[in-house]
Image (cartoon, rainbow, N blue to C red):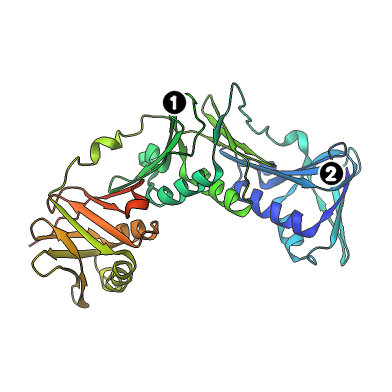
Amino acid sequence: MKLVCSQTELNSSLQLVSRAIAGRPTHPVLANVLVTADAAAGRISLTGFDLSLGIQTSFAAVVEGSGAITMPAKLLTDIVSRLPPDGPITLSCPDGEEQVELTALSGSYQMRGMTAEDFPDLPLAQNGRPILLSGAALVEGLRSTLFASSSDEAKQILTGIHLKVEEGGLEFAATDGHRLAVRRNQAGGEQGAEPFAVTVPARSLRELERLLSARPSEESISLFCDRGQVVFLWADQVLTSRSLDGTYPNYGQLIPESFERSLTIERKPLLAALERIAVLADQHNNVVKFSADPSTAELLLSADAQDVGSGSEALPIRMEGEAIELAFNVRYVLEGLKSMAAQEVCLKLNTSTSPAILHGDAEEQAFTYLVMPVQIRS
């Protein structure tokens, strides 16, 4: 194998696939990146795979000899990232050997790899007709929901994002049992596609969002799902992941059909006030009290950290319904507000212990964020 490529292309591609390299590999080859050179296509592909998440990307190169070898991912990335940008890099490895030589304008390096035969095959489940998805809709949906997924491995199904494709639209849902984020995009899926639902680990979808954001593509993303594996395929990139077993909660039943109270407030001032109050809330239990009164058209935010201090801020609101006092985990509310872009948000609720819903303005009605209040101890 022998090829010449640019430092910039190789470095950026290594940064992407390194996200799928095992931190504590069960086999030495899983700490390596698979480098494959194709002389006929004039391309080099890099693959990282930790047996759960797989990322593959390719780019143009001058390939003098086809071949494949695996190389230590961290060592290769650390060397390449420090080489002069935009300069040519030559990778060469004689057939049947495992010693790779990397040559740049500044010097040369030798490193021992492992044969490509030792590297596990990427599960490219491409059976049947793919479901075509909009890249922009995928990014939007993932950014709106990933933060609400659970990190508790004991609730494994909740560590994923539930993706539904139906009637040409996309729906993303994430919940950790304390809050629920749902994003609906009516133009994200292929018209006429068969209804489809799958739950994918949030970790894998964070990498998908990073990939799509780092290298945006106007092409549709092809989604394949087969035997516990999902594959996202587009342009020169592939991301594979296992899917999560089990039945995702029927989250639609959690969202109340009607509300007795609604508060409309400017998002940015609310966000800023909560971030200030959170300084105190963080000292105790992350709880911030919300007191809303239509007669004063004000929302009072307050936090009391015992033996540390207390604080409060008032914000103007438009309110329908009777006065109410309730409390939330401030981190949950902040994360929901940060995922929105609306100028105004509407907080809809019934009682101080029932689910509360945060909506954006008319342009963000496709996003629903449910938060469970915290019981106030008298």
User: In this picture, is 273 found above or below 5?
Assistant: below
**Residue under circle 2?**
98
Q: Secondary structure at mark 2?
A: loop
Looking at the rendered image, the disc whose residue lies closer to the viewer, 1 or 2, is 1
For mark 1, what is the residue? 195
Q: Which quadrant does the C terminus fall into?
A: bottom left
Residue at left offset 36%, top offset 29%: 247
**Mark closest to the chain's N terminus, 1 or 2:** 2
- Estimate the spatial distance between the alpha carbons at disc 1 and disc 2, rounded to whole Å: 48 Å
Q: Position of residue 288 (x, y in %)?
A: 22, 65
Question: Observer-nearest residue: 329 or 191?
Answer: 191
Left or right: 340 as drawn, with respect to 26: left
Residue that extends furthest to the top in the rendered view of this protein:
128
User: Which kind of residue does numbered mark 1 sit on?
Assistant: Pro
Position of residue 186 in the picture relative to residue 373 (left or right): right
Q: Looking at the image, which is closer to me, 36 or 30?
A: 36
Foreground residue among 60 and 204: 60
Residue 58, image x, y percentages = 73, 44
- Residue 339 location (% of width, % of height): 40, 56
The 10 Å Cα crowd at callout 2, few under 14, some 14 to 19, many 20 or more, is some
